Image (tube, grey):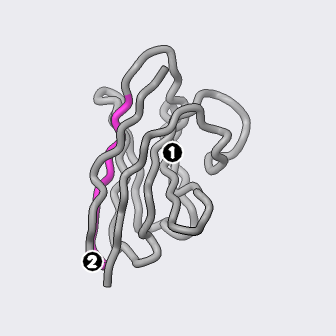
């Protein structure tokens, strides 16, 4: 089983920056792919970014590409999401997730086996 704990959320003005962290612990799980998802009030949860641990390959949604950067420190078992130039529409609960080898694109929820509880990001004008 794996435990994922997010941190780093908060309130920030538009144009500002935040860095989210996701620490993983436990045993017997795979972090072949790790991702960040977000869910805004009244909307479905959607993929923001993902990183494939072995290859280092990264993927982003169109809405955040160029503004957000996903990274992972394997030694610290921690994944990060650096969010710059934040916009009002980035306001959401952000979740990290981990998944093993399998089929499906990075932004499919079923691709992931373990989820964190989420951290709230609020962007104001």
Please state the horizontal and vertical placement of residue 47, each as a whole percent of the image. Answer: 57, 55
- Is the residue 69 above or below the residue 109 in the image? below
Dividing the picture into quadrants, the one containing residue 66 is bottom left
Q: What stretch is highlighted in magenta?
A: 13-24
Q: Which residue corresponds to the image point at 38% horizontal and 45% vertical from the top-left?
A: 71
Please state the horizontal and vertical placement of residue 89, each as a whole percent of the image. Answer: 46, 75
Q: Which residue corresponds to the image point at 53% horizontal and 24% vertical from the top-left?
A: 30
| Extreme-bottom residue of the structure | 125
Q: Mark 1 points at which residue?
A: 35
Please state the horizontal and vertical placement of residue 83, each as a whole percent of the image. Answer: 35, 62
Q: Callout 1 environment at 10 Å: few (<14), some (14 to 19), or many (20+)?
A: many
| Extreme-front residue of the structure | 42
Q: Mark 2 points at which residue?
A: 13
- Is the residue 6 above or below the residue 3 in the image? below
Q: Quadrant of the C terminus?
A: bottom left
- CA gap between label 2 and label 1 equals 25 Å
Q: Which secondary structure, mark 2?
A: strand
User: 57 or 122, which lies in front?
Assistant: 122
Name the magenta segment's main secondary structure.
strand
Please state the horizontal and vertical placement of residue 51, each as a whole percent of the image. Answer: 50, 43
Q: Which residue corresponds to the image point at 36% horizontal and 38% vertical from the top-left?
A: 5
User: Could you tell whether 120 is left or right of 42 in the image?
Assistant: left
Q: Which residue corresponds to the image point at 40% horizontal and 56% vertical from the top-left?
A: 69
| Extreme-right residue of the structure | 103
**Is residue 72 in the magenta section?**
no
Nearer-N-terminus badge (2/1): 2
**Is residue 14 in the magenta section?**
yes
């Amino acid at each position: 089983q794996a435990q994922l704990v997010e941190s780093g959320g908060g309130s920030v003005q538009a144009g500002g920056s935040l860095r989210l962290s996701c620490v993983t612990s436990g045993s017997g799980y795979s972090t072949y792919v790790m991702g960040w998802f977000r869910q805004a009030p009244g909307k479905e949860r959607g993929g923001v970014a993902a990183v494939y641990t072995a290859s280092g390959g990264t993927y982003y949604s169109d809405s955040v590409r160029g503004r957000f950067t996903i990274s992972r420190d394997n030694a610290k078992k921690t994944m990060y999401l650096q969010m710059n130039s934040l916009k009002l529409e980035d306001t959401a609960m952000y979740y990290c997730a981990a998944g093993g080898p399998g089929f499906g694109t990075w932004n499919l929820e079923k691709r992931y086996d373990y989820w964190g509880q989420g951290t709230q990001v609020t962007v104001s004008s």
